[in-house]
Image (cartoon, rainbow, N blue to C red):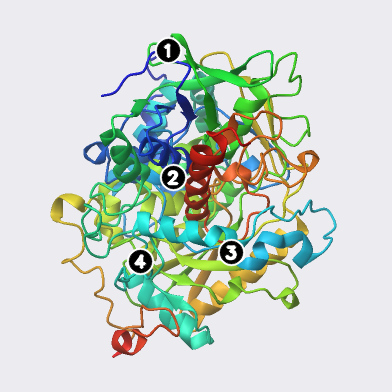
Amino acid sequence: MTRFDYDDSDVVVIVGSGAGGGTLAHELCRRGFKTVVLEAGPHLTGEDYHNDEWAAFGQMAWTDPRTTSGSWAIADDFPNLPAWIVKAVGGTTTHWAGACPRFKSHEFAARTTYGDIEGADLLDWPITLSELEPYYDQAEIKMGVTHRHGRPPLPANNNYKVFANGADKLGYRDYSTGPYATNAEPYDGRPASIQDGFNFQGDKHGSKWSTLVAELPKAEATGNLDLRPDSQAVQILHGPDGRATGVLYVDRNGTLRRQRAAVVSVAGNSIETARLLLLSASTRFPDGMANSSGQVGRNYMRHTTGTVWGQFDKPVRMYRGETMAGVIADESRLDTGRGFVGGYYMQTIALGPAFFAKFVAPGSWGPKLAEIVDGYLNTAGMWIVGEDMPQGTNRITLSDTVDEHGIPVANVHFDDHPNDVAMRRHGQQQGAAVYKAVGAHRTIETPPYPSTHNLGTCRMSQRPGDGVVDRFGRAHDVPNLFVTDGSVFTTGAAANPTLTIVALATRQADFIASDFRTGRN
Amino acid sequence: MPTLLSDDQRRLLVDLLRAAFPHDTFPMGPYERAAQAVVDAAAANPRLQAQLLQGLDDLDRQREVPFSRLDPDIAAVVLRGIADTPFFTGIVDVAVVALYDDHEVWDVLGYEGASYDKGGYIDRGFNDLDWLPDPRIESYGDDSRQEASA
């Protein structure tokens, strides 16, 4: 176990060990950078995980207080749980489903493609698909994504059989069991999936890519990684020249520590990343670090989501096998003739009875809920995930509520944009049609879960006044401060974000290792 | 903090849960354990316990006869009348989790629970659905499509 000195000012400090932070750590460690990773949560491993929804939730989820506001259903249904993300080493990659679509070319130019949408703060990304393509390739190879670079597809499970047959009957053509970053056969030292059915609870088998089982062990093997679990960052420090000089964090004993740094990366997932920058206000940065634009925390996105369940006369047993292992991509196309801009994917999903009953119609009870739950065995499920509109008023701010250390927690404000509402309605109608096409006697529409895709809040922009970071994720205001997670997304696209976060982190590591280190920037 | 609920009140709570989550196929055990979960939650939450103590007494006075002796349709009407009260939502919040996380309920619903120790479902029916044809798994237009759908 490598350990660097608190006063070693040559190290790179990365706050967060998920898709962005864990990937950046590996990419920098293998290039010889001394790297300290501060992870707020504990170091759980496969043996620790529970094949049990509630126990796993209690073990892994970020359940520290947060507050909510706005007209979104979450503010009523789950007012202190705006997001369903992980607080543990590996971050949210330890419970993600593994879906790995790439962004489409036009999704990097949402403002140009969609035009001026009233109420939306669209902006083109300062990078293009062709610039990111080599890094998408690297990310897919790194993660062992099925259907890509010779990796075989996952087999059809029961939930997929219903989903794909319905898609075919409805005339959809672009359906398949991937791409997913879960091994269908052994790859990169990790075994093939045994289809145990527990993904959101931590993958005990290690078949699914996560920074816990892939990037961080590789980083550790270089001898350049100092991984510190149970370490909650509370402030980024800066010197008189405005450069970041280190990070203050509370360690597992409740002691405040200062780790000096040459470079700081914030990768705490959109809500915590924005919170940390806002908490790092100073005389020089009165509105928060890297926030001269006033954009830190703004344009919080969560994808337009919803779930559709189909109930049949015969058994499905959706819980057997990979939780998500099927995609319909036909609706991800560019087609504004559907009454909304942006596209969406349909992806298989399964929940156990406890989560199913809790989430199918939040707060509900009575004979109707009982009937729906009675049909559990014969239920198939799909999740809708599509591009939502950035809005400057959808925003992370510091709350009046404080955490166990007395530090203000994040408030998450969100209002659906009319485009989000139209897309969700379309997606749920199409999802229901998929199941009806293969004989569903009942379909059920479930509103969004606490957000699993948390994006924006530190968006990437060409002009410093439009966003927080530049095309490499470097803060416009602070030359040695980087953001390395989905916070940097200028717009959300339809694709599940992890693959793009990994590609961007890999690209950022190239930048830090070459241009940045040699002082050309 | 010990519970102040009487045995009669605890029995009434069980009946309330049976009316709120009416499954003909569920035995009594899961309802009794869900009621216990509510009592346990209330033991750590004075506000919830206060709601329970007053709310259960009030529930019995909603009609001429005690709640437990009401016709199921009438009991459902009574519950709809109190659906938005902190008393009722406090119970539902805890009970919906406890009831449907009960392993006896899982057996009834056909859910098999933890699977890792049994080797997952790779050899235990993850793909045993036989009332629809096997769909292709490759993307449309992939070279391997013919093989996959053959």
* Amino acid type, callout 3: Ser
* Amino acid type, callout 2: Val
A10 or A139, which is in the foreground?
A10
Quarter that holds the C terminus of chain A:
top right
What residue is shown with label 4? Answer: A146
Q: How crowded is mark 2: few (under 14 residues within 10 Å), some or many (20 or more)?
A: many
* Amino acid type, callout 1: Tyr
Q: Using the image, tell me which numbered label, if any, was put on residue B96.
A: 2
Mark 2 vs mark 1: same chain?
no
Q: How crowded is mark 1: few (under 14 residues within 10 Å), some or many (20 or more)?
A: some
Q: Residue at x 48, y 77 (%)?
A: A435
Mark 3 vs mark 2: same chain?
no
A352 or A415, which is in the foreground?
A415
Residue B86 appears anywhere in the view: no
What residue is shown with label 1? Answer: A6
What residue is shown with label 3? Answer: A130
CA gap between label 3 and label 1 equals 41 Å
Earlier in the chain: of badge 1 and badge 4, it is 1
Look at the numbered discs 1 and 4 and tell me whether their residues touch, using CB distance below 8 Å: no
Q: Which residue is drawn at 49% across and 60% down?
A: A134
* Amino acid type, callout 4: Thr
**Whole-percent x, y for residue A271 in the image:** 59, 36
Residue B145 appears anywhere in the view: yes
